[in-house]
Amino acid sequence: MRVAAVQYEVGTDPQANLAAGLRLIDAAAGQGAELIVLPEFCNHLSWYESREHARALACRHGDAFLTAIAARAARHRAHVKLGVTLARRDGRTTGASLLYGPGGELLGEADKQVLMGAENDHLDPGDTAGPVVRTAVGRLGMYACMEGVICEVTRGLALRGAQVLLNSLNSFAVDEAALHVPVRAAENKVWVVAANKVGPLIPADRLAEVSAGLGVPVEWLHGAGESQVVAPDGTVMARGPRTGEAVVVADIDPPAADAGRARHFATRRPGRYLPLAAPGRERTGPPGAPALPVAVVRGDAGLVRRAVDGGARLVVLPEGSKVTVEEAADAVKGTDAHVVTGAGVLVGADGAIQQADGVYDLPWGRLAVITGSAARHPEEFRLAALADADVVAVPFTPAEPWELRLGLLERSAENRLNIVAAGQDGPGGLAGAILALPADFTLWTRWQGPFTGQISHPMVTHVKNADLLVQGTVHPAQSVNRLVSRGTDLVAGRPWRLAGALVAGPSEGTPVKETLQHVEQMLDESPVIDVTETFERLKGILEELKARIDARFELSADPGSPGAYGTHPDGPGGRLDAYAGPEIDWLVHSWLGNPAASFANLHLTAWLGPHIRVPHLGIALLVWPEGWFYQDFIPRASLTADGGHFDRYYAPLDAQWLAFKEENPDFAWFTSRAGFIRASLSPNAYCYSFPRSPGNLDIVRDLLHARVGRWLEWVDEAEPVPEGERAALAAADLAVRRNIAERDPANVMGVRYFGQELTDRLVRGLWGGDRTLPRPS
């Protein structure tokens, strides 16, 4: 697949910004790109006078700006990802990543979880984890700028199955391209397509004022460009220039790294990572010493003593070092120095020092020790930062070049940790590193030296394969400063509420079990599978049931129902047909989804007229890619207030309902996270996930036929409702039907596939908001 990252200047004129974006989309498509990534805040410079100003200039779903982007994606049959400010219907204004598909449909959206500096003044952070979007070109995850300066967002997307990460940036920092972008590819074994801006990031008439206030030259307040495509080993395959518009193109193979990612994640230790999902807090530990002399020793105990005599107070040995605890203790005898052995044991003059939590209080500050393959995982260093460590000693064995070129540098930067890493000979000629935190950090504090354009990057002393002793100085006191910008703390500001994937580990083909997940979460955390065969089977089951209903009732198709929509079988699609008649108020026969990419949702619901009080019939079938089904008889009265209604229609079904739970261990109860949906279920509702085997599909088919047969019997046996009570019953029915349709959490899948406008129409189709046929009386 050919991908493109485009970089260009964005100003305060939304129309000019749109024209530039469309022009660059055309240019990328002209080079054959099937997936095109635009920068962050494409609609307007991220510079506002107030929250009200930001909301007024934000995009809305379906507005001219986003409609034009969607249409251009459709014109080129390309996937297009961009970042904008978005005015949400609930009153929030977010920094949103939007992905449009080759049919112009909105495939996914993700609100920025970690806001940078003044963004906190004008925008609201995301409150849900962004989706992993299953597409014909691969599993795509979206993030934006500051979310890539820390590890959680990208890690969570990779753990949930993303193969390609799409990063839209609005950054002046040169270390984005040098470090923060490529490391996310390497540490997660994914492809990254990153698009940054060029040109001023501040309105032209304010540049001089802001430059003087910050003490930063005007040229450093421009977008840093260098948009790029990065391979899963951290290799930059294509990179744009530092300045000027560019279309950066590369060919990638999304599934190529799947096996390597699985092997890499297999060495994670999710059971240790629970603190990552705990509330953030500011650092409470006192600052350490301003300076600490350290050394990496790749030799014998005599070389350790030489390092100590040279002033080193902390010596780190490589994994596999033959220096024993006793030899290390002898080497530091008579001094206050410490050695971390190749096995990760901290040794002082009196021997090994034990510490239960692995973080040591030493005269110069707090030390954490991370050994072996754990050093490849950002979660381990995050734990050290949460424990208020100042320095991390890393005896390890570098296995891939990215670990010392990118990985440990990012561990230092994103956590504000000094790192002393020692290894045996490694790839790329490097065996270790001494990474010291600089005092000059971000634009939040005035720099002591000239501004270098780096937002968060350690000072690096490389340890080469030929080196036996390398000495340097780190700065424990600098670990206290974690504010990368005003209001943005690298550690306390991490999106801890959305860190579930880091604690749970990678998604796999695990057995179906009781779940509390949203439908979109189940889909996003599952592999992409063509489920067309299962979809056709489920569709056939509903057609059989619809035929039984057709044989009993007089029905007419409502001209106001949506009918077919979308691009199925080439992409997402669906159909919604509604009917009414003398005895049926509203019957819906519908489906929605993209069976070629794991998902389809099918409905058959029959809402009776007010002439009888028989419960309504509700059926829903889902493949995500496992199976799921719902069937209920929707009550026409309060089952606690009207005991007769319960005794007539629900009590006789208890035994069958309990027997199904006991006799079908493959079927796992599904609990909706939406309280309203739980409240809508009767005591005999069926709501189960199940492996989509032919035998299980037969069980679902047989149960649904039996339930529809029982319902038809009730209809034939029902006594009429007095005419004076029918209007109230009809009004209550409509209220229930509308509430269920509008509050269904699965509506988000419609928005993902087809956008808000069409989804709103489909929801109205479910309850009859656009009906033309009269209601029965």
Image: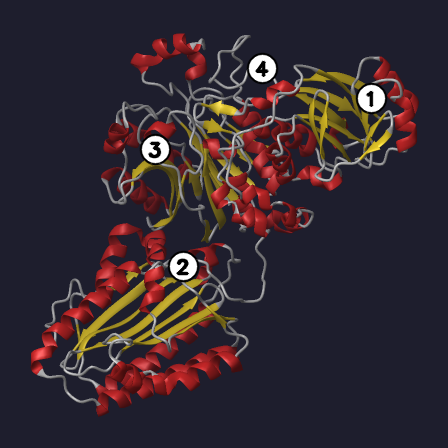
The quarter of the picture where residue 740 lies is bottom left
Query: Circle 3 sits in a helix, a strand or a loop, which is it?
Result: loop
From the top left corner, tell me how far across and down residue 265 is, in percent.
65, 48
Query: Circle 1 sits in a helix, a strand or a loop, which is it?
Result: loop
Q: Amino acid at mark 2?
A: Arg
Write down the residue under mark 4. 439
Indicate which disc residue 673 carries.
2
Mark count: 4
Q: Does the CB distance between marks 1 and 3 fall below 8 Å?
A: no
Image quarter where the C terminus lies is: bottom left
The quarter of the picture where residue 335 lies is top right
Q: CA distance from mark 4 to mark 1?
A: 28 Å
Left or right of residue 271, residue 588 in this image: left
Q: Residues within 10 Å of mark 2 (few under 14, many from 20)?
A: some
Residue 725 visible (yes or no): yes
610 relative to 298, above or below:
below
Q: Does the CB distance between marks 4 and 1 fall below 8 Å?
A: no
Q: CA distance from mark 1 to mark 2?
A: 57 Å
**Of 374 and 235, which appears nearest the observer?**
374
Write down the residue under mark 1. 467
Q: Amino acid at mark 3?
A: Leu
Query: Circle 4 sits in a helix, a strand or a loop, which is it?
Result: loop
**Of 135 and 683, which appears nearest the observer?**
683
Write down the residue under mark 3. 123
From the top left corner, tell me how far across and down residue 389 is, in percent.
65, 29
From the top left corner, tell me how far across and down residue 192 is, in percent.
53, 38
What's the image's color scheme?
A: secondary structure
